[in-house]
Image (cartoon, grey):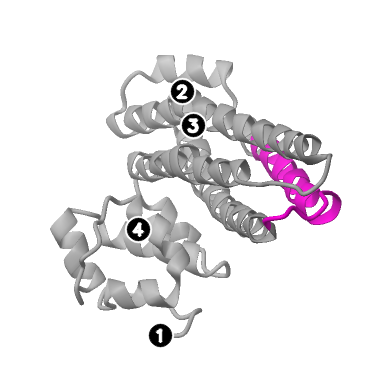
């Protein structure tokens, strides 16, 4: 299977992992445990009670940046999409960022400016970490509950007036703009490492940190794409339907 070929239901998940190891973190978000033998994706989804169609669309979207079946992804429920997005938040805040933070703690400089260099890097990293935490917290406390409420109201034709009231107090159209700050802070952090910090004594750790930051950037970009291209249009469409019922 070529790196840009479509991942299909009859593919062995183990082979998919060998082809693109970056999908490991995505697979983990579905609570799939390793020791999968030569099981196909279809068999694994059946065993774990996972939506096969949704799992395939997510794998392909993360595997190939040129693949993004917008209409297919928009056909899934907001609840299903939100569950995956929340599992991604957990991965970012409780695993990936903490792992990078531990690597930063290992850095040492053979110079009198050791503390200064480490302080600068920690400052930019903490700003980025706090930005991600604030952003994901806002999504889970405000955006996602709003999206699920709109979907339930639209499908059941209930709580229409309450929906309209919520729509007047919250605008989903401003949601996409909130990703810009995270992207800028990550770019600043990478530039600090690439351009400005002197090489530490343990140079390999700095390369590892930078590699992890680029992997995190790609993952966050795919995550934001699902929110902006799938979640937001679905909510806007449902909002319009609800407005027409008044």
191 drawn magenta: yes
Distance Cα–Cα, label 4 vs label 1: 18 Å
Q: Residue tagged by mark 3?
A: 239
Q: Is residue 20 above or below residue 62?
A: below
Q: Quadrant of residue 35?
A: bottom left
Distance Cα–Cα, label 3 vs label 4: 32 Å
In the structure shown, which secondary structural element does the residue marked by tag 2 occupy?
A: helix
In the structure shown, which secondary structural element does the residue marked by tag 1 occupy?
A: loop
Which of pointers 4 and 1 lies earlier in the amino acid sequence?
A: 1
Q: Residues within 10 Å of mark 4 (few under 14, many from 20)?
A: some
Q: Report the residue at 27% width, 50% height from top.
A: 31
The magenta segment is 177-202
Which of pointers 2 and 1 lies earlier in the amino acid sequence?
A: 1
Distance Cα–Cα, label 3 vs label 1: 42 Å
Distance Cα–Cα, label 3 vs label 2: 19 Å
CB of mark 3 within 8 Å of CB of mark 2?
Answer: no
Which of pointers 3 and 2 lies earlier in the amino acid sequence?
A: 2
In this rendering, would 201 be left or right of 152? right
Which marked residue is nearer to the observer: mark 3 or mark 4?
Answer: 4
- What percent of the width, then of the height, locates residue 48? 18, 55
Q: Residues within 10 Å of mark 2 (few under 14, many from 20)?
A: few
Q: Residue tagged by mark 4?
A: 27
Which marked residue is nearer to the observer: mark 3 or mark 1?
Answer: 1
Q: Report the residue at 62% width, 56% height from top.
A: 205
Which of pointers 3 and 4 lies earlier in the amino acid sequence?
A: 4
Q: Residue tagged by mark 2?
A: 141
Q: Report the residue at 57% width, 16% height from top.
A: 169
Which marked residue is nearer to the observer: mark 3 or mark 2?
Answer: 2
Which of pointers 4 and 2 lies earlier in the amino acid sequence?
A: 4
């Amino acid at each position: 299977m070529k790196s840009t070929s479509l991942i299909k239901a009859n593919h062995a998940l183990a082979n998919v992992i060998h082809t693109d190891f970056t999908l490991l973190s995505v697979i983990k978000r579905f609570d799939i445990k390793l020791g999968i033998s030569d099981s196909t994706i279809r068999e694994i989804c059946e065993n774990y009670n996972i939506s096969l169609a949704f799992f395939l669309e997510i794998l392909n979207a993360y595997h190939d940046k040129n693949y993004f079946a917008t209409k297919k992804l928009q056909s899934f429920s907001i609840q299903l999409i939100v569950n995956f997005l929340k599992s991604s938040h957990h991965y970012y805040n409780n695993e990936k960022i903490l792992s990078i933070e531990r690597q930063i703690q290992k850095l040492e400089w053979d110079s009198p400016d050791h503390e200064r260099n480490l302080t600068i890097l920690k400052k930019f990293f903490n700003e980025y970490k706090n930005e991600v935490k604030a952003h994901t917290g806002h999504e889970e406390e405000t955006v996602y509950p709003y999206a699920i409420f709109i979907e339930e109201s639209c499908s059941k034709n209930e709580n229409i007036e309450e929906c309209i009231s919520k729509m007047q107090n919250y605008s989903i159209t401003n949601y996409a703009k909130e990703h810009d700050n995270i992207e800028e802070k990550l770019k600043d952090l990478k530039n600090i490492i690439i351009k400005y910090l002197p090489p530490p004594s343990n140079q390999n750790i700095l390369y590892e940190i930078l590699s992890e930051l680029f992997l995190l950037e790609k993952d966050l970009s795919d995550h934001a794409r699902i929110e902006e291209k799938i979640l937001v249009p679905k909510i806007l469409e449902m909002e319009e339907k609800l407005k027409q019922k008044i």
